[in-house]
Image (cartoon, rainbow, N blue to C red):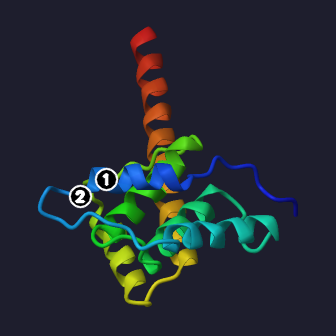
Amino acid sequence: MSPIEVIKLNPDLVRRIHARVLNERELQGEYEGRLEGALSRLQARLDYNLGIDDVFDVAGCYAAFITEAPAFTDGDKRTAFRASIAVLGMNGINPKFQRVPDEPYYDMIIECAKGNCSENEIAGYLRALHSQFMIQLESISNGSNTNQKHLED
């Protein structure tokens, strides 16, 4: 299998995401080198074609690796959440959460921080969420076509 083509996040973009998730009372700061280390873990997997089959795997890696780093003094889990969603969006996938933050997904990120959830589990959740949305969208589309046909009759 050949490596996938994917638009990735760079450290500066992750830092901007981080700045947006913090509020004024939280600690600003970064532990030197940890963010780059987290992002390089993904790059190594891409370079050596290790378990990255689609953009959901990439998003799962961002969520897990940023959470596990932790690169920032505050807001790592929220940054990981938003970074994973951002990479999906940059690659044409728009997960539809019922509520943002999506509680089951955010709970997975918290479990990941505790060492109880892997990047593969996160990718699987995001993939399933997207599949559910696509099924719903197809159902709505098919229903609207049926309704349109009835209107024309």
x and y percentages locating residue 118 in the rendered image: 52, 82
**Left or right relative to 40: residue 98:** left
Locate residue 45 relative to residue 135 in the image: left or right: right
Q: Residue at x 57, y 52 (%)?
A: 10
Q: Secondary structure at mark 1?
A: helix
Q: Residues within 10 Å of mark 2 (few under 14, many from 20)?
A: some
Q: Tell me where residue 34 appears, x and y as whole percent.
A: 50, 74
Residue at the image point whose x is 50% and y is 68% from the top: 35
Q: Which of 127 and 63 lies nearest the eye of the viewer?
A: 63
Cβ atoms at labels 2 and 1 below 8 Å apart: yes
Image quadrant occupied by the C terminus: top left
Q: What residue is disc 2 on? A: 22
Does any portion of residue 120 appear in the rendered image?
yes
Q: Is residue 48 left or right of residue 77?
A: right
Type of amino acid under label 1: Ala
The residue depicted at 74 percent of the width and 64 percent of the height is 46
